[in-house]
Image (cartoon, rainbow, N blue to C red):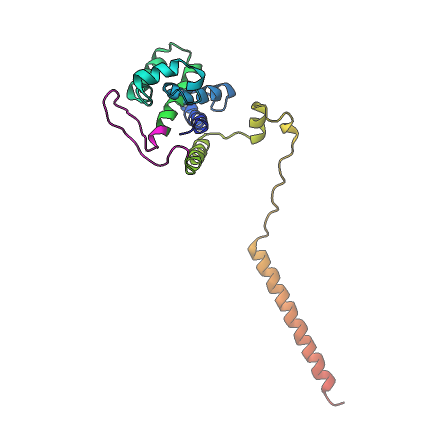
Amino acid sequence: MMAGSHIALGMAAWMAAAPHLGQPPLAPGAMALAALGGLLPDIDHPKSWVGRRVRPVSDILAALLGHRGVTHSLLAVVGCWLLLRHQAVPVAWAAPIIIGYLSHLGADLLTPGGLRLAWPLRGTWALPLCRTGSAFEPLVVALLIAAAWASLPQRPDPRTLAERWGLCFTCEALPLPPPAPPRPPRRRLAAQSTDGSQALADARQGGLEGRSHSTMPG
């Protein structure tokens, strides 16, 4: 997938995983680390977003290992697990990076290129739902983000979230939209319509009686 998709999915994966790790799911720092982790596996591609910024490291990795090699394999998954288990890096930093990293592998698994999970052995594993850069890719990403948001045990007020991310400085002062007026009960409407029909019928009956009296001979 494209770099923007990996960033979004890394953050979405952290939103879904953080509550199970005892971490706040929407902390800006952790979200940024998850986005970084979502880009790291492509360090073996000199033309990727992260590869262009770490040259000549990406050139060396591409020449020795190729793209979607060891950085996209089960060996990388084991390395992430060991890093988290032995806490060589503080969990508050390592956890979002690793979750973002794993989200990248999951996203690439959904493309026809797939992953060489058993690297250095040959063979590719894939669940080809969308091609990289296709018009269908944003839809897949949006659905996964919506699923991650829906998985949150407590979804915050959007105004508070916007303030936390620095997108709004006076959000607390903004009023919420007024609630919709309550709909009148159907029984009451039915009763009113019945009363109105009865009154109209009485008025017509009275008019008919008046006409009959006026036409009677004196």
- Does 96 appear above or below 129? above
Q: State left or right for residue 104 relative to residue 163.
A: left
State the image coordinates of residue 193 (x, y, percent, origin top left): 60, 62
Where does the image place residue 145, in percent across and percent down from the top left? 45, 32
Q: Main secondary structure of the magenta part?
A: loop
Q: Is residue 132 magenta?
A: yes
Kindly give the residue lying farthest to the top in the view shown. 88
Quadrant in which the C terminus is drawn: bottom right
Question: Could one spot residue 42 in this view of the protein?
Answer: yes
- In the image, residue 11 lies in the stretch drawn in magenta: no
Q: Quadrant of residue 116?
A: top left
Residue drawn at (41%, 19%) of the image = 51
In the picture, residue 100 is in which quadrant? top left
Q: Is residue 146 left or right of residue 59?
A: right
Asked if residue 19 lies left or right of residue 205, the reply is left
Camera-nearest residue between 178 and 100: 100
Determine the residue located farthest toward the left in the rendered image. 121
**Which sits in the foreground, 202 or 11?**
11
Q: Quadrant of residue 178?
A: top right
Q: Nearer the viewer, residue 194 or 50?
A: 50
Q: Is residue 81 visible?
A: no
Mark count: 0
Q: Which residues are magenta?
A: 108-133
Camera-side residue of 177 and 117: 117
Image quadrant where one finds the N terminus: top left
Position above or below: 139 against 63: below
Residue 120 lies, in percent from the top left, at 25, 20
Q: Position of residue 206 (x, y in %)?
A: 69, 75
